[in-house]
Amino acid sequence: MEVKFRIAGRNDLEDIIRLTNECFDEQTPLAYAEKIWKKYEHDPNQIYLNGYLNGEIVAHTKITIIPTIYEDMNTYAILNHVCVKPDMRRHHLGTKLLDETFRICKKCGVKTVELWSKNFRQPAHAMYQHYGFEVVDAKFFSKDV
């Protein structure tokens, strides 16, 4: 399967939201995505990566590049909404998506790539570990503002 990857643009938002809503059982409205896109569209550290097969979006992730002043941490990236269209899974598209993600991260000087994934996404966890991600001994904390 020849998937073509490219950095998303404003015109890709509807496809991204449709795919992520399907993959994560979310209900993000397109108007909300457009508002956030407009606010951050010129930030080079906010990268939306899409994979297309025959012109249809089949894979997506959001890459956030975070430069720091801390030597050990250096510049790192956080991935979120790593997803492959449900009927396209088991074709190694997730691996291809991560390959392209790491190519971009290396180009941006990233030292470490991190992601978090909800507990119920066991097949995704297996793919991440097969790719070489390690489960770290940490807890993910969240508090609404």
Image (cartoon, rainbow, N blue to C red):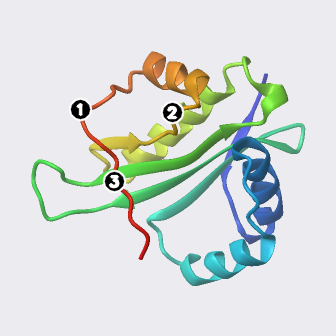
The earlier-in-sequence mark between 3 and 2 is: 2
**Image point 32% across, 48% down: which residue?**
110
Q: Tell me the kind of residue under disc 3.
A: Phe
Whole-percent x, y for residue 30 in the image = 79, 71
Whole-percent x, y for residue 137 in the image = 23, 32
- Position of residue 36 in the picture relative to residue 17 (left or right): left
For the residue labelled by badge 1, is the local secondary structure a helix, a strand or a loop? loop
Residue beneath label 1, please? 137
Quarter of the figure with residue 34: bottom right
Quadrant including the C terminus: bottom left
**Image point 73% across, 64% down: which residue?**
28
Whole-percent x, y for residue 126 in the image = 52, 18
Q: Tell me the kind of residue under disc 2.
A: Asn
Closer-to-camera residue (97/30): 30
Mark drawn on residue 16: none
Residue beneath label 3, please? 141
Vertical relation: 89 (above or below) 106: above
For the residues labelled 3 and 1, the Cα–Cα distance comes to: 13 Å
The earlier-in-sequence mark between 1 and 2 is: 2
**Image point 68% across, 82% down: which residue?**
35
Q: Residues within 10 Å of mark 3 (few under 14, many from 20)?
A: few
Whole-percent x, y for residue 94 in the image = 62, 29
Quarter of the figure with residue 17: bottom right
Vertical relation: 66 (above or below) 125: below
Vertical relation: 8 (above or below) 87: below
Residue beneath label 2, please? 119
For the residues labelled 3 and 2, the Cα–Cα distance comes to: 14 Å
For the residues labelled 1 and 2, the Cα–Cα distance comes to: 15 Å
Q: Residues within 10 Å of mark 1 (few under 14, many from 20)?
A: few
For the residue labelled by badge 2, is the local secondary structure a helix, a strand or a loop? loop
For the residue labelled by badge 3, is the local secondary structure a helix, a strand or a loop? loop
Q: Tell me the kind of residue under disc 1.
A: Asp
